[in-house]
Amino acid sequence: MKNDLILTKTVKGKKFLYQVFDSENHLISKRLSGRDYVACTMNGKYYFGRLDLVLKGDHLREVNYYREMTLETFETYKARHLRYSNAEPTLEHFAELQEHNANQFAALLTIAVL
């Protein structure tokens, strides 16, 4: 997948406005902060002050979580689901959840760099 994201940094008083745009110039996410960042995830959840912080700490934990969830089988999901709910899980709900997990995984791995 080609990374066509653009991360911009604009001075706003004593802070910086960071904005992530796609290739068609649609705003995807933004953050106003006094910190100096060099990169962020596509969804704007994680911002990085240095590139060597990508895939470290909380970012790595969340990437690993969504990677595991996208690899989960319906049988594993069903067993996990039944521990917390009496409702029988459906294949349709599982498919929706897998699509969500895959989108989150991709968003966490798509990095915009200044």
Image (spheres, grey):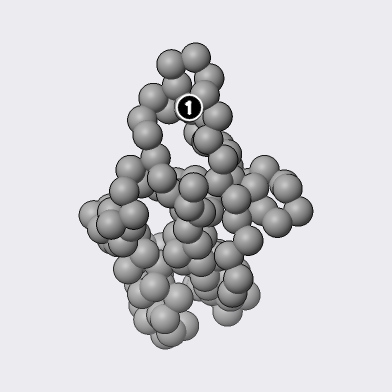
As drawn, which residue projects farthest toward the right? 24
Location of residue 52 (image quadrant): bottom left
Q: Visible in this render: residue 77? A: no
Q: Visible in this render: residue 21? A: yes
Left or right: where does residue 87 sit relative to residue 72? right
Residue 108 versus residue 69 in the image, above or below: above
As drawn, which residue projects farthest toward the top? 13
Residue 114 versus residue 87 in the image, above or below: above
In x, y percent, where is residue 25?
Answer: 73, 48
Which of the image's four quarters has the N terminus? bottom right
In x, y percent, where is residue 47?
Answer: 40, 44
Amino acid residing under circle 1? Phe
Q: Nearer the viewer, residue 98 or 87?
A: 98
Location of residue 73 (image quadrant): bottom left
Q: Residues within 10 Å of mark 1 (few under 14, many from 20)?
A: some
Left or right: where does residue 34 sit relative to residue 53? right
In x, y percent, where is residue 85?
Answer: 41, 63
Q: Identify the residue at image location x=32%, y=68%.
A: 64
Q: Identify the residue at image location x=49%, y=14%.
A: 13
Residue designated by label 1: 16
Q: Identify the residue at image location x=53%, y=20%.
A: 12
Location of residue 60 (image quadrant): bottom left
In x, y percent, where is residue 67?
Answer: 39, 73
Left or right: where does residue 90 sit relative to residue 68? right
Q: Identify the residue at image location x=67%, y=53%.
A: 22
